[in-house]
Image: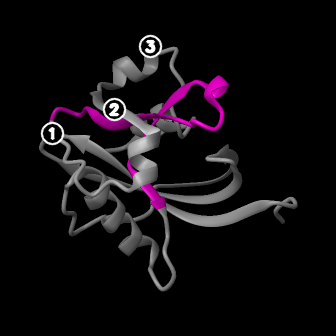
Amino acid sequence: MATRGTANRRAAKVIVIGSDESVLLFRGGDSARPEAGTWWFPPGGGVEAGESIEEAARREVQEETGLVVDDLGPVVHRRTVEFSFNGSVIRSDEHYFIVRTDRFDVDVAGWTKVERKAIEGHRWWTLSELRATSETVYPDELVALLETVP
């Protein structure tokens, strides 16, 4: 059950793995809480009314990266997390998919106003870079998840 003032949402996230086994992540922050610093995360976002998790994942990855995805495969990870963002507390039930593709240049034309304000950049990370980084990466379990992906 959410605490008072907490918004519940279902979210679809897509871990995009390039043909060289690198992972596409975005770097973002929260202008309402600059003291929180920045963090890295895969593309994705909230499920809209009437939309399935799979439909949301496809829409979100296309809006945020320009990549059109047909086959998502199964949900490979799920977590519930509560966080503050943009002046709100959000309790998010997150469903993660993995998509394999050739590396590509990210197209930000579909970004929302909030995304343009909150996302500072993106890059492709190798697994060894993710293991070694001291930067914050979400989900916390990303490295362990990637180590088990065939």
Q: Is residue 71 left or right of residue 104?
A: right
Identify the mark nearer the N-term, 2 or 1. 1
Structural crowding at the residue carrying mark 1, measured as other residues with C-alpha within 10 Å and reported as few (<14), some (14–19) or many (≥20): few
Structural crowding at the residue carrying mark 2, measured as other residues with C-alpha within 10 Å and reported as few (<14), some (14–19) or many (≥20): few
Residue that numbered label 3 is attached to? 132
Give the residue drawn at x 19%, y 62%. Answer: 68
Q: Is residue 54 left or right of residue 103?
A: right
For mark 2, give the secondary structure: strand
Residue that numbered label 2 is attached to? 121
Q: CA distance from mark 1 to mark 3?
A: 21 Å
Give the residue drawn at x 26%, y 60%. Answer: 62
Amino acid type for the residue under numbered disc 3 = Ala
Amino acid type for the residue under numbered disc 2 = Gly
Q: CA distance from mark 3 to mark 2?
A: 20 Å
For mark 3, give the secondary structure: helix
Query: Depth-wise, is mark 2 or mark 1 nearer the camera?
Result: 2
Q: Nearer the viewer, residue 83 or 133?
A: 83
Q: Is residue 119 visible?
A: yes
The image quadrant that residue 146 belongs to is top left
Q: Which residues are magenta?
A: 20-45
Query: Depth-wise, is mark 3 or mark 2 nearer the camera?
Result: 2
Q: Nearer the viewer, residue 50 or 78?
A: 50
Give the residue drawn at x 36%, y 61%. Answer: 60
Residue that numbered label 1 is attached to? 19
Q: Position of residue 143 (x, y in %)?
A: 46, 31
Amino acid type for the residue under numbered disc 1 = Ser
Identify the mark nearer the N-term, 1 or 3. 1
Magenta span contains residue 70: no
- In which quadrant will I find the C terminus? top left
